[in-house]
Amino acid sequence: MSETPTPIPDQARLRGWLEAHLGPAPGFEIVPLQGGASNLIYKVTLGAATYALRRPPLVGNDPTSNNLLREMRLLRALAQTTIPHTRLVLGCEQPDVIGAPFELLEWHAGFAAKAPLPPGFEQPEARRRMAFELVDALATVSNADWRAIGLDGFGKPEGFLERQVERWLTQLERYRVRNIPSLDRLALWLRENTPEMQRASLVHGDYQFINVMYEPALPVRLSAIVDWESATIGDPLLDLGWMLAGWQEPGEEASFASYIDWHGFPGRRELAERYAAATGLSLQALGYYMALAMFKLGIIMEGAYARYVKGRSTLPLHARMEHDVPMMIARGLRFSQAY
């Protein structure tokens, strides 16, 4: 659901630019698929070929977000790896074609793991395979030789963990509209329990079911990791913590990741141990990474709530953050003590 209709780019200019790079083709169509606070996504058909086009949002919550130029650089680097990803077909770094930089990506006909799952994927063994594919794909990200593929300078791994709390509190101050219960308590715990980073790795930054694609038919195969706009070089365990912080286990209150039916998926510990075996990383401080993930997500989503409070959003999802953000912070505190 969008706050405003997703704008359609100047079709004649876009088609001309595409044909200049890909060659003339009969037939052209562009259809908006998603809009709002995240990148705008369109389905583009040019002749017999289909692509996804992504451009930055019309309005961003934070000036460091949605840097499509960084994502283009990363996708070019990923082409040298075995990391499953959506191939970058073309990248336009100038705004003169559609009013903003954009990237043209190969089209994936698969699915993200939203409920209901396609026929056959609701079976317990298929769900287990989906989870294992998710973890195994993350291990390929964490194990990538980021220097060898040209990502020197893509992030600042030195002092990465030590910067996290202040970095996110600084962002919060740009739009703070209230006091969030237990936020200061969680921030203090994170400061006092920051582990030593085991190694610097490529980090996706928003690794979860919603940001991967699966092939549409069995057997289960994860075909692409998408939405790399938050990627950097830092501590790989933050990706694992982010994924597991939104995981739902029997007997727990509902997580923020309510887009999926969690019945039949393996538990956090089994997935974490599979990741550790594939990467050689210790899980001793796993609770820290899960708590940090909830701290970070709560602050990000407080930005959405601030937009609602200030009259810049009417989305029910943003209004719901009045209650959900404090729940995320409370969840982070529980992770800090339970793992």
Image (cartoon, helix red, strand yellow):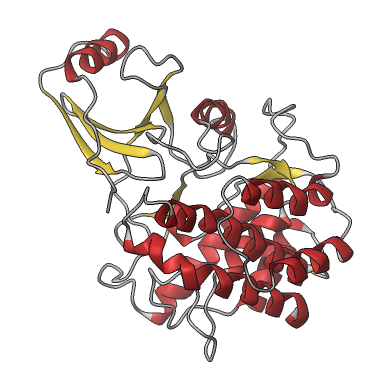
At x 52%, y 59%, the residue is 208
Image location of residue 270, percent across then percent down: 64, 77
Horizontal side of residue 222 vs 164, given as left or right:
left
Tell me how many marks there are. 0
Residue 204: tell me if it is visible.
yes
Horizontal side of residue 46 vs 58, given as left or right:
left
Image location of residue 129, percent across then percent down: 47, 69
260 relative to 74, above or below: below
Horizontal side of residue 94 vs 215, given as left or right:
right
Q: Quadrant of the C terminus?
A: bottom right
At x 54%, y 87%, the residue is 252
Closest to the observer: 182 or 264?
A: 182
At x 35%, y 65%, the residue is 114
Image location of residue 311, percent across then percent down: 37, 51
Horizontal side of residue 211 vs 51, given as left or right:
right
Closest to the observer: 294 or 74?
A: 294
4 relative to 298, above or below: above
Image location of residue 18, percent across then percent down: 28, 16
At x 70%, y 59%, the residue is 278
